[in-house]
Amino acid sequence: MERKHEMAKKNQYELIENSVIDDGAFLLEPYDDWKENIAFWIAQYLSQKCDEQSRRFVTEDNIPKITSIKEAILNSKDIEAIGKYVNELGVLKFKAIKQYYNNIYPFYHYMLERKAYSIKNITTTLLANYFSNTEEKQKKDLAAGKIIKVDIPKNIKNIWELSYASKVNRLTVLLNFIKFIENSNIDKESENEVFLFDIERSKISKSIQKEKRVLSVLTPKDGFQKFFNAIELVQYKDEVRERNILMLKLLMYLGIRVSELVYLKKDDITIDKNIVKFNIIGKGNKQRLLYVTYSHIKKHMIKYEKIRTESPDGFYFTTNKGKQVNDRYINTIVHNTLVAAQIEVTKKSSVHMLRHSVASYLKHTLKMDNASISKWLGHEDIRTTMIYLHYTEQEIIDMAKSFKKIGN
């Protein structure tokens, strides 16, 4: 792999030299083959995203490898090859890039089917048709010869198989990608030398039909309390008992994502008198501080830290071999706790369900407003919890204190 990446590094500048017009600007369509043009822009876009991503969870040994893979991506003219490089980044704990690739790649296939063989064919209409496409319409268009058959890898879902939230996320990534091209291109055929896509998000958004669904949550009135009370009823081996209880209670008190829990580091935790401060690193490397009254979790922290195996990467929750606890295991202990609480287990009874449950508890039991909940959960998009405001550290501590000690 190292030799392959070194070859890519050697040829990289020859490839990009033919495309660069000005510092940071590239020919819109530098190649005759439109597939190579799409691959070129995806490579440039992913390269920028690599530079923006945090290397917090990357070991020092892997940084040169990531740099080498990034250069290989820049040198690639093939979108499939780029996907393989993106997977290699994931193995090195540099996973955020994959979400960008996985949201652009299916749209590339849609363009292939529609014979939209130019970047300039990316229009509001094309995007709206893509997001409103259905399995029935796809079959009709194929039978009528309006589209060509393109085999999509089995691990890639069709657009009609995605949830509403996943479609909105895909649209956001695609529009961000298009904006990147718009800000970085030189079009020799255009009078102003820059090709503008003139995409209207509002029209595309209307094509994404909202689904009627009921979120799986623990009812604020009694389900939340029943689950909390059952946390210590589950039978665990002595070496994992306090760790598992502490993980579940932090998920309940903090409402954090499972990824935020498993990537929590020992250095992220500070105890100040009767307050435990948690430095949470969320999506997009966004940082927020959350707090728990120390007495709520003190006995579990003390017992866990007495038997805790140190992690070479500094992770707080570890196995007895010092490895990072994975999210699949946490889903398992959530399932076991639901059973112990005699709460019905469904396909949606995952660890993420606890996050929705915390939001519901904050809203309906503690009567927090939407802005407070948004800050607490670390939502970036205003549409997620309607309002997003800034709070002082003391205001967030006050929120933590208002989160009464459940379970007693």
Image: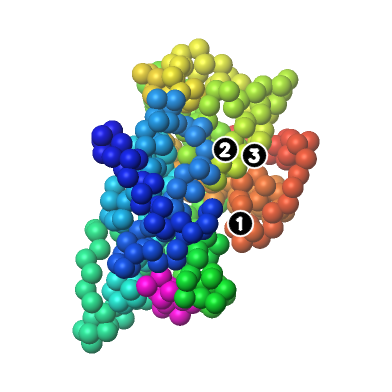
CB atoms of marks 2 and 3 within 8 Å: no
N-term-proximal mark, 3 vs 1: 3
Give the residue type that dot 3 points to: Arg
Q: Which amino acid type is shown beneath numbered disc 1?
A: Asp
| Mark 1 or mark 2: whose residue is earlier in sequence | 2
> How far apart in space, not on screen, are marks 3 and 1 (Cα)?
15 Å
| Residue corresponding to mark 1 | 381
Which image quadrant is residue 156 in? bottom left
Q: Please provide percent x and percent y for residue 219.
A: 55, 51
Q: Position of residue 220 (x, y in %)?
A: 59, 50
Q: Is residue 130 magenta?
A: yes
**Residue 8 placed where, x, y %?**
31, 43
Please state the extent of the stretch shown in magenta in the rendering.
118-132
Quarter of the image that includes the C terminus: top right
Residue 288, label in figure: 3
Q: Residues within 10 Å of mark 2 (few under 14, many from 20)?
A: many
Vertical placement of residue 233 versus 155, above or below: above
Picture quarter with the N terminus = top left
- Closest to the observer, 274 or 7: 7
The extreme top residue here reads 306
Prevailing secondary structure class for the magenta stretch in the rendered image: helix
Q: Residue at x 26, y 80 (%)?
A: 147
Image height check: is 197 above or below 11? below
CA gap, disc 1 and disc 2? 16 Å
Residue at the spot 37% in from the left edge and 37% down from the top edge: 68
Residue 84 image point, x, y percent: 29, 47
Residue beneath disc 2: 281
